[in-house]
Amino acid sequence: MHEKITQSHTKYPLRSYVFCPSKQSYVIVKKFDEKTNTYECRVFDPKADSRTESKELVLRYEELSSFINVCVQLQQNAADKPKCYSNFKVDINEKIHDVLFPLLNQAFGKGSSLLYKDKIVTMDDTFFQKHVMPADVFLAGGKGKQPAVRWRRYKEIQNTSYTGASKDYEDALKFKARRDLYWCGFLWTQEYNKKDFKLEVRWRVNSEEPSEWVEFSASPDDKDPDFDHLHTFDIQDQGFKPVFVPEGSFIDIAAKCPGANQFCYIYSGYPDTYKNIKEQEYDFDTHYSDWNRNCTDSDWGFFPGVLYYPA
């Protein structure tokens, strides 16, 4: 009997996270009591204040588990009813992407999207980190992706005047995140002469290594359906995953225009403007970028907005 408990103790080492089905809670293993063959654990609550004292529990090995059952609903589009419903027994410390995406790719092909509680699942999220509970549902869609939030720094676009983008000197702007989020793209104004255009774009978080230069292209018919004067460019369409930007960090974006096209003029991108745009959260502030070599600044110029997912 003692040998069996020792093996169990090895399975649940001190300071490890496990799940207690009877309490429907994640717990942290604090101590193993050899006399009583029990674990002393503390309930883990990700929403609790660090000063709040957590509940203590004494549990047997049989009351703990490294596994939970979760559900996945597979569908072609977000508006469709699920075509399939499946149960999965998963290790709480495994990455969600590694467990569920092979199934999605088999069902729909590469490019499938996965949502948990209406938020996109990233490559590094584990079931424990997302505090997934038994029978929680993951929503998987095979066509397209979850629409990102569009955030604008301007209320007005001057369609009767223009400013030129450079093929040699990059326009750049920093967006400071006011919350944890996943950045996935940017907005651009319409081409003044209604011509096709291309952009070469790169980005970075704070002073990290920047991305490669990535080419985006658009025609006059590609304008955002909700904002006739804007184009929407999503890095996911180029095979990149959304970029995590912690609260207080900067996403720095730069662009060059190989055709040196002219674009509609934008102005008055002041904080008093963008933090008062209706039906838009005050999730960013704009700042001058050291990358900028042309005509963009924190209150005017290019990059009228960004695309993102709240974390």
Image (cartoon, rainbow, N blue to C red):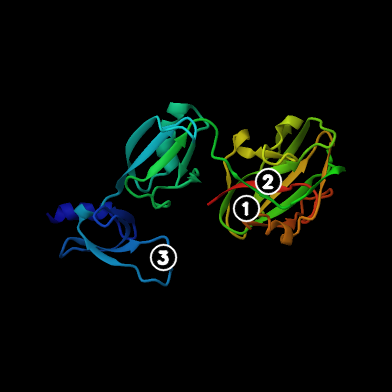
Give above or below for 51 relative to 6.
Answer: below
Q: Secondary structure at mark 2?
A: strand
Type of amino acid under label 3: Ala
Give how far across and how far down residue 128 sits, in percent: 39, 51
In three-dimensional space, the C-alpha distance between marks 3 and 1, rounded to whole angstroms, equals 30 Å
**Nearer the N terminus, badge 1 or badge 2?**
2
Q: Is residue 296 above or below residue 258?
A: below
Residue 100 in the figure: left or right of residue 203: left
Instruction: Please identify the residue farthest to the front as the structure is shown.
Output: 278
| Residue placed under numbered mark 3 in the picture | 48
> Mark 2 sits on what residue?
203
- In this view, the residue in front, 176 or 149, is 149
Q: Position of residue 298 (x, y in %)?
A: 77, 56
Residue behind mark 1: 279
Residue occupying image coordinates x 45% and y 36%: 140
Q: Is residue 16 left or right of residue 77?
A: left
Mark 1 and mark 2: span between their CA atoms? 27 Å
- Identify the secondary structure beneath mark 3: loop
Badge 2 amino acid: Trp
Identified by mark 1, the residue type is: Glu
> In which image quadrant can residue 94 be found?
top left
Callout 2 environment at 10 Å: few (<14), some (14 to 19), or many (20+)?
Answer: many
Between circles 1 and 2, the one closer to the viewer is 1
Q: Position of residue 303 (x, y in %)?
A: 74, 47
Q: Earlier in the sequence, mark 2 or mark 3?
A: 3
Other-residue count near label 3 (Cα within 10 Å), few / some / many at <14 / 14–19 / ≥20: few
Front residue (pair 138, 172) = 138
